[in-house]
Image (cartoon, rainbow, N blue to C red):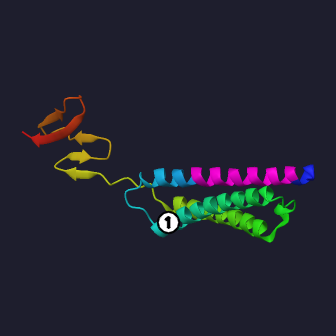
Amino acid sequence: MDPNKIKATDYLTESLKLIVTIATILFGGLLAYRSNISVPVNIWLYYVSLGLLAISSVVSVANINSLINKMFRGEEDAIKKKEVKNLNIASILTLFTGIIFGAWFLSVQTQSKPSPINTNGTVITDSSITVGKDIPSTVKIVKNKDGKITEVTITPK
C-alpha cells in the first residue's frame, strides 16, 4: 500500500476527529450558556444550532468508521471514494452552519437587567437594596445552617 495514501487517510481521520471535538465543545458551551438565560430570544436558533452540531459529530464518526472499514478491506483508494467525500463535505458544512446559527442565537440574546423596584423610598435592584434616608426601617436577615442568606425582609417602623 502506498505510504502517501495511508498518510492522507490518517490526516483525514484526524481532521474528522477534530470536527467531532469542536462540535462537541460548542454543543456543551451552548447548553451551558442557555442555562444562564431566563427568557431566550429566538429559541429556534438554539435548537437548530444544537441539531447541526450533533449531526456534524455523528456524520464525522460515520465517516471515520467508513474509512476504517474500507482500509481494513484493503481498498487503497478509500479516501477517493464518493461516499467518503460526501460525508466529509456534510460534516464540515453542518459544523460551520451550526456555528453560524449558534453565533446568531448568542448575538440576539439581550443581557438586560430587571428595572429597579421603587416602593416607599426603598429601591431594589438585582444586586442591592437601598432604603431612603428619611424612612426608618427594620431589616431582618434569615440564614440557614450553612450561613447562607435565605430571606431578607425590610419593613418600615
Q: Nearer the viewer, residue 81 or 22?
A: 81
Image location (x, y in percent) of residue 124: 26, 46
* Residue 15 appears in the picture as rendered: yes
Few, some or many residues within 10 Å of mark 1 (<14, 14–19, 20+): some
Q: In the image, what residue occupies the spot 67% across and 59% down?
A: 60
Up/down of 15 relative to 56, above or below: above
Q: Which residues are magenta?
A: 6-25
Residue 131, by quadrant, is top left
Does the stretch in magenta take in 10? yes
Mark 1 is on which residue type? Tyr
Query: Dot 1 lies on which element?
Result: helix
Q: Residue at x 86, y 49 (%)?
A: 7
- Taking the spot 87% from the left edge, 59% from the top edge, the residue there is 76
Q: How many marks?
A: 1
Residue 83 vs residue 142, the one in the foreground: 83
Q: Looking at the magenta stretch, what is its main secondary structure?
A: helix
Is any atom of residue 99 visible in this view? no
Instruction: Provide residue 88's location: percent of width, then percent of height.
Output: 74, 63
Residue at 17% over, 34% down: 141
User: Horizontally, is 110 left or right of 150 in the view?
Assistant: right
Magenta segment includes 11: yes
